[in-house]
Every structure is written in structure tokens, then in C-alpha cells.
Amino acid sequence: MEIFEILQRLTEVNGVAGDERRAAEKAAEILADMGFQTEMCYSGCICRIGNDELPLVMIDAHIDEIGMTVTYITDDGFLKIGECGGLDPRVLPAQQVTVFGKETLKGVVASVPPHLAKDGSKTPDIKDIYIDVGLSGERARELVSPGDTVVIENPVTRLHGGRVTAKSLDNRAGAAAVIAALGLLRGKEIPVSVAAVFSAKEETGGAGARTAAYTLAPHLAIVTDVSFAAVAGDRPEECGKMGKGPMIGFSPSLSREFSDSAVNTAKRLGIPFQIEVMPGRTGTNADVIGISRRGVKTVTISVPIKHMHTPIETVDMADIENTARLIAAAVESAGDLCD
Amino acid sequence: MICVTDELEKLCSLDGISGDEGQVREYILSRIEGKAQVTVDPLGNVIAFVKGKKTSDKRVMISAHMDEVGFVTTYINDDGTLKIAPVGGIEPGAAFGKRVKVYGKGGCVNGVIGGRAIHNLSSAQRKEIPEITSMCVDIGADSSDEAKSLVSPGDSVCFVSQFCAFGDGFLKGKAIDDRAGCAIMLHLIDEGVEYDTWFTFVVQEEIGLRGSACAAYTVEPDIAIVLESTTAADIPPAQGDSQVCRLQKGPVVSFMDRRTIYDKELYRLAFETAKDCMIPCQTKSLIAGGNDAGAIHVSRGGVRTAAISLPCRYLHSPSCVIHRSDLENAYILLKNLLNRIYDK
């Protein structure tokens, strides 16, 4: 299956942290179409390949996305919200949203027009945000309940060259890379067994990855998420570049041995890569997987992304493809790290 | 005959920022062909004379603007992103994080309006939405040369926003201001008028009521009715008069805004007409905004002018929201008011 098709199918479903079942099921459906078996569990969706008597490598890609949750319904039918994950509130005014109530509803984030605005340059406080679903208070309370999730829509769309924009590319882009990597590994003799986990609730703290790592007790872990690609005004030492390949993490919280090995593998195979230095924790599922049980040697292999945590997240298809190649190659080279 | 809502959906699918209304004009010309005597003036206004069953000694002009708010490309950055400036009044929050289309020389290019990820900003920077002129449009190009092969300064940039119905009878889309007015006029032309009437579909309202000034000069009306969309703030936490006007409470007839003090007799006649037709009608509880009436009522020696507006939430954003009932009632009010003006 083409990676673009995988990405398209993964982004057409919505899965806000804690309500990501549909997205995990979509990953399972794509994998089934590719001939893989999967299991759904508390942590998300797991796909195992290889001889299970060999040491286990866990590959994690979180399947949830940032979004909002309904906290209150006003008497005139507007919804108040809280954020699920670190949503960028600057983008909220006048967005079209989908509310997952008893029925799937469309709505708009209320905004103040220029004719009445006092200071339009202030980022709205999430507490002051209202969602207009075009219903009376009574009707809204029939169809929507506190706890229902809300997403901002943006269907996958091609920009110039290999760039695409969509909502939830954090981390459907990473999930697409892992699915493609499984495709590359199919039928190969590999020195390890693999459990790919499409994990829940990363955006709210990594609950899915934490429980999956405990359950699987892997020898090694590869965490595939998205990471910052530089835009104007960014510091080059803090960001990667779009189109320059997967970002291999180096951090005191990661395994330097595994990071070095990933770099050597990429060099040996001529896969473009970038080094991402994180001076403490990584802000990814690697933080919880790395300290699971007695500790797991972990590396991050990330897809560069622009406009993170907005509905217009943007990635380069070549970066996803090279991330898939590097993950597959890292698995093939992982035997030495398991001793 | 196409219903007004379907007509509006079609019109909102077209792009036409001020000064670049060609798509909208071509569609309108194709729609009224054979139903009116049509001229296009030097600015691009469509001026249509529709023959009625009767002729009146009063010359009445109905007007709506074709243009919408958007952006224009001003510069191509070294990193291949585009700088833009707003065309018409757009709040920074309505622009940031939205999808756009750039009309480049080789065709339309998709883009997104973005900036630095919130994670990489200081806490002070997080509190501010950047000025539109500090935002970048990312079209996927990595260098200025790559971008220059696709787009140039001066290219129009339009919001991408699918028209849709939601909730109980609400409609959402970009450019409802003022394609709603255009839709009502097309519907009336389809249905036919009692008396000879002039219809003007005008350009450049959003940058200062420019097209209507020339159209009014050309038509030389005695009376004008402007069809518009106006700010409704019937959203929390606004209460009472600060809501300005409300959806589902009928068309808005203003007594005054920042550009016009409307003709008192027409104002009263509009409310009387609405009452007799048993449709709701409201006025604005805030003297704010302005529309083509501002240019038309001072055309030549003066024109008695009224405005019938649709209450619209989130005006000048990619998600303008109106209610279907207000659209239908605005049509009924216009049609009946027009006949009363002629019969008086």
C-alpha cells in the first residue's frame, strides 16, 4: 500500500486522546488489508511479527491526537470546552469543528469579528471559548454530553512537492511510517521479534505506551513521533528541517548505544537522517517506555513536522518514507543490542 | 428555479477577493443571461436592468457586493514562504492556522497560514496572535526560487472553507458576506419583478465601498436598497444590546451605522412591510460597521437608501454563519418592500 494512502486513511478518522478507539481500529484495518494480524487492547492496537522466542523490540507510534472535550453546555446551546493535549489556542477562532455527541455534529468556534473586536491580537483563553453547534440549549443537551470530544477538521491535502497538510499528522504521520516499516519487514528473516504498538493517550501523558511497555516487557524500544521542523524565527539547534530525513534522538533519557546504532545504520544504507538533541526528557512516549519495569533501551526516530498541534500540521512524504526505511533497518540491525 | 440556499452554496464556492471578483462576475453573468439587459462597467461592476410588468417613474436600484475579504501576497521569503496582507478587515485569529488557496500564475496552489509551533515560544509570545503581516503562508516550497516558480507578489489568497449546513437550519461558509445578497438578487431576477428594476452586483466593498459609488453614478437611482450581511454577536457572553442583532430574528434593517443615516421613511416602511407579511424583522442595537449604502446615499444629488442585512455570526472569517430562515425572510421582505416603494 502506498504511504499516502495509509496516511489518508489514518487521518480521515478522529481520535482525540482518550477517545482514540476509531483511530486504533483504522490502523488495525489497514494492517489487516496488508495481511497482518493485530490485537486491540487497553493500550491501543498491537501488531506482532517475527519469531516470538527472539528478543522483543517494541515500536511505538501513538495513535491519539490533540483536541478538545466538552465541559459544559450553556442555556443557549453553546459548548464550553477543555483541551485534550497541548492544543495551540491561537488557531481556534472561526474554525469548523466536529463534535462526537450522540450524533456527529458540525459546529464553529465562536469568534469576535473585527467590527466589534477590542484587541484581536490576544490569544483567547480556552475558558472563554464557545462552540456554536446551531442548537437550542435543550437540543444541545439532548445530543451532547460533557466528556464528548471535539476536533478541528482538515482533510489531508497536497501542497507543493511532497508536502501534505492535515489535522492529526501528529502522530498519524509516525503511525503511517511504522505501518510502512512493517510492510518492509514482511517475509524477512529478522534477528528479533517485533511488537508495533499504536498507543493511546500520548497527548495527555503517555498512558497507552506506559501500559503497553509493562505488558510487553521489551528488550528495546523505538519510539516514532513527530518533531519540530524549523520555520522562520526558530533556533536551528532546536529544530530539524523538512525533507531532510528522520530525526534520530540523542538525549540523556535515551540509549546512546541505540542512537549511535541508528545513525550507523542510516549511514550504511544511505538513508538521509538528522540528529535531534534533547537535553533532558524527550516529550515523547520514550520518556515512559524507557523506565518501564527494569528499564528499556530506547531511541526516538521522528518525522519532521511544521505547525505542530494545529489543524494545519504539515509533513513531507519523503520524510515518512525514509522514517519507515530507517525503522525497518534499525530492527534488522537490532540483534547486537539485545545481548 | 434554484432555491436561495443552493444558490448561496454555489456562490460561496467561488473565490473573489476585492479587486479580483472575476469568478463571481462570470457566474452571475451566466446566470442572468437573457433575463436582463447587462453591462459590465470599467471597475467590473455588473449592472443589470430587469424589465417588469409595469414601468414606474421611480428608478429603484438593488445592490449587493460580489467581493469577499481575503489576502494578497506581498513578498516571497527566502525560505519559500509567502508574506501576505489582509484585503478587508480580518482579525489575526481568524487567519492563523487556516487553509488558503493562492491564485498563482500557473494555477491555484494550496497553502496554510502558520508560524512557529507554540511549544517553541516564550510565555509572553504565547499570549499574542501574530499580526497578519507577520504570518507566513506555507505552500510547501523550500526556497524563494521554488516559490517564485508558482506565485508572485500581488497574487490573491482566499480562505478554503467548505459551505455546509449544521444544527437546526444554520449555514456556514466563507464569503457569505455578501454572496447572500447576490443570491437573493439572482433569485428575484429568476422570479421576475413587477416594475422595471436595476440590479447591481458590485466590486470592492470590503476596501471602502468603491464599486457601489460608480454603479450608483451610472444607474442614477431615486431609491436604493442595499443587501448585506451584518455582524451578529448573539454568542456568549454578550447580552442585551451588545448582541447587536440575532440570528432567527429576521432580516436586519438599520437606522444608522458608521457610514450612513438611513432614510427614515424607508426604514419605517420596511418594518411595516415585515409586520404585514408576518415575518420577523429587527434593527441593530449598535452603531457599528458600514456598507455600500454609505457610498450610494451620497451619489450625485443624493439617493434615498435602505439596507436589508442578514444577521451573520463570525463575519469576515472563513466560517461565517447565518440562519436559513433569515435568508428566506430577507427575500420576502425585499420583494414586498420593493412593490410598496413603487406603489406608494
Image (cartoon, helix red, strand yellow):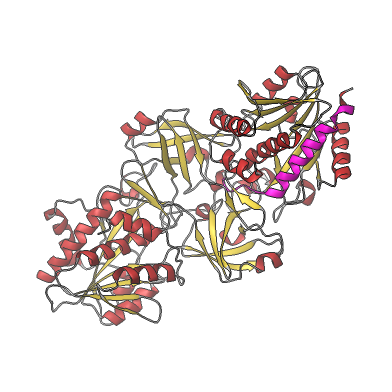
Q: Main secondary structure of the magenta part?
A: helix
Q: Give the total number of marks visible in the rendering.
A: 0
Whether residue B286 appears in this view of the structure is no
Q: Is residue B41 left or right of residue A60?
A: left
- Above or below for B324 versus B222: above
The front one of A229 and A81 is: A229
At horizontal 55% and vertical 43% (from top left) the residue drawn is A89
The front one of A290 and B246 is: A290
Residues in magenta, as a range = A311-336
The quadrant in which the C terminus of chain B is found is bottom left
**Residue A165, image x and y in percent?**
60, 49
- Above or below for B141 versus A71: below
At horizontal 53% and vertical 36% (from top left) the residue drawn is A14
Q: Is residue B307 left or right of residue A324?
A: left
- Above or below for A127 versus B36: above
Q: Is residue A64 left or right of residue A293?
A: left
At horizontal 40% and vertical 79% (from top left) the residue drawn is B43
The quadrant in which the N terminus of chain B is found is bottom left
**Which residue lies most toward the left here?**
B344
Image-quadrant location for residue B235: top left
Image-quadrant location for residue B237: top left
At horizontal 14% and vertical 58% (from top left) the residue drawn is B272
**Residue B202, image x and y in percent?**
36, 72
Q: Is residue A159 left or right of residue B247?
A: right
- Above or below for B75 versus A316: below
**Residue B16, image x and y in percent?**
44, 66
